[in-house]
Image (cartoon, coloured by chain):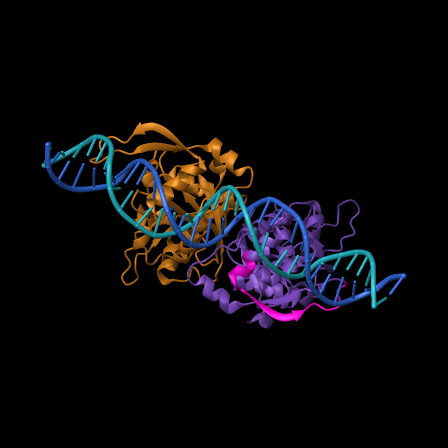
Chain colours: A purple, B orange, C cyan, D blue
Amino acid sequence: MVGNTRKKTDLNPNNSVDCVIFGFDFEQIKVLLIDRGQNLGNSKNLRALPGNLIYEEEDLDEAAYRVLEELTGIKDIYLEQVGAFGNPNRVNKESDREWLKSIRDEPNARVITAAYYSLVKIDDFVPRAHSFAKKAEWISLTEIEELAFDHFEILQVAKEKLKQKIKIQPIGFNLLPEKFTLSQLHKLYECIFEKPLDKRNFRRKIQKLNILTNLKEKQRGVPHKPSQLYKFNEENYQLLTQNGYDNFGF
Amino acid sequence: MVGNTRKKTDLNPNNSVDCVIFGFDFEQIKVLLIDRGQNLGNSKNLRALPGNLIYEEEDLDEAAYRVLEELTGIKDIYLEQVGAFGNPNRVNKESDREWLKSIRDEPNARVITAAYYSLVKIDDFVPRAHSFAKKAEWISLTEIEELAFDHFEILQVAKEKLKQKIKIQPIGFNLLPEKFTLSQLHKLYECIFEKPLDKRNFRRKIQKLNILTNLKEKQRGVPHKPSQLYKFNEENYQLLTQNGYDNFGF
DNA sequence: ATGTCAAATTGTCTTTTAGACACTTTCAAA
DNA sequence: TTTGAAAGTGTCTAAAAGACAATTTGACAT
């Protein structure tokens, strides 16, 4: 809103937002992480969640949308709060302290962060490096073992929230392109729940919900039987839920 | 932990915790609210959620447990984070500003709060007024129309989280005494979901879960057929959930 | 043209769960 | 002993979940 009139001194040194940005490449769930490009002698160059301090006169949600847009250029997407993380030691790893010294006016301030997660269409977004990020990359959930600050913990909580949320709201469509196949949707749910789901039962249930529109259009150029393409039917979804229906789990 | 060595100047003026403490009197869900005892000419004396600033060197969860214990004397109870609330105007009602001036060193600071909800056995707790609270009272959810700060909004979100959570974890027992009847449990679920639930179907499902122990003991002194008393069976609950079962909804 | 590969697509049966529905039992107190 | 008030109980039906395997389709290679 008033972002262009803001100065660095308008930042609130004690509160930040961090974003867990999920993507899906039809194979695995990925998370957008930044590389701080530290070439320190002994400490690891850990990746971090994109995040930053908020402005003094800024709502938390607003800050999350702003940071997300600054980092990805994407707006009007699904965004949900994970929670507040405020362990006084969350910022105390040696490598994290080093790094903060190089980018913050008050590197020793205690920072309480509000974490958000968002679901984006991975192809709409080409990671571009942010001011203090040397790289921004999609990393598979399965290969993340350690992150800067308390970001690994935040990621675990975000995954759990996503798992719960998708059982009551079909937010997974935010991770898929406009047109998608049932197999892609099926694979997505398997990745999120981290367990195999019976193909026929999955298809039966999702089709019965009546929130997919068959585009009467087929995949092209695949070396096997081409799949039907579908899109999410927002109107039918509204109709379905306005009477309180909330069972989108598998 | 180190509470007795803490001074007022160790407080973090920008971050607080607020607690939505739910209770159940066998009739309705209640929330513990404090009365700030304002006798202002024109502005209303709105009730508030119990909450306070956190200490600089204190984890948020720890702060929530501390504040809760300071206010209620209760510990080792169910406590869960609702989320962070940080609207820059959340503290801007005239009556709230007035009050903050009387209790805070920095009454104009922007305060971001982490809200928690907890479920307590109402009879274990006799509200006792806290330093800056003139009264502490159990108020029925149904009669709360407006609260101080953004506390009404926090309450709504907390209610929603509770509703969702109780569908996947039988946390309602935290609101009941050790020994309770099926009718009391039934009524509790009706209050939380804000809709009637069929008695027979409710009893069938809860009994099938096998997480209740029949105490072979009856209610006494009631002017009608006395009810069997039950207690929550923690061991069976563990057995049930260790394979991923999470359907405690009705 | 034919064959092969890879993934898409489809249906049935069984078991479990949800939902609707009403009468009998038990104790206390009048 | 009667009355009032809530406790306690069973069946039927419909819907959903879960297990399970053969056939179809298009691309590509030969």
Inspect this view and state whether residue B49 appears. Answer: no
Viewer-proximal residue, A145 or A184?
A: A184
Q: Give how far across and how far down residue B83 sits, in percent.
A: 49, 52
- Quadrant position of residue A175: bottom right
Q: Quadrant of residue A64?
A: bottom right
Q: Which residues are magenta?
A: A205-223
Residue B179 vs residue A115, the one in the foreground = B179
The residue located at (36%, 32%) in the rendering is B230
The answer to whether residue B236 is seen in the rendering is yes
- How many marks on residues? 0
Q: Position of residue D12 (x, y in %)?
A: 37, 47
In this rendered view, identify the residue nearer to me: B110 or A2: A2
- Find residue A191 and report its horizontal and vertical position in percent: 64, 52
Residue at image x 58%, y 70%?
A: A3
The quarter holding residue D23 reads bottom right
Compared with residue A27, is residue B224 higher up or lower down, i.e. above or below? above
Q: Is residue B220 above or below residue B104?
A: above
Q: Is residue A70 left or right of residue A220?
A: left
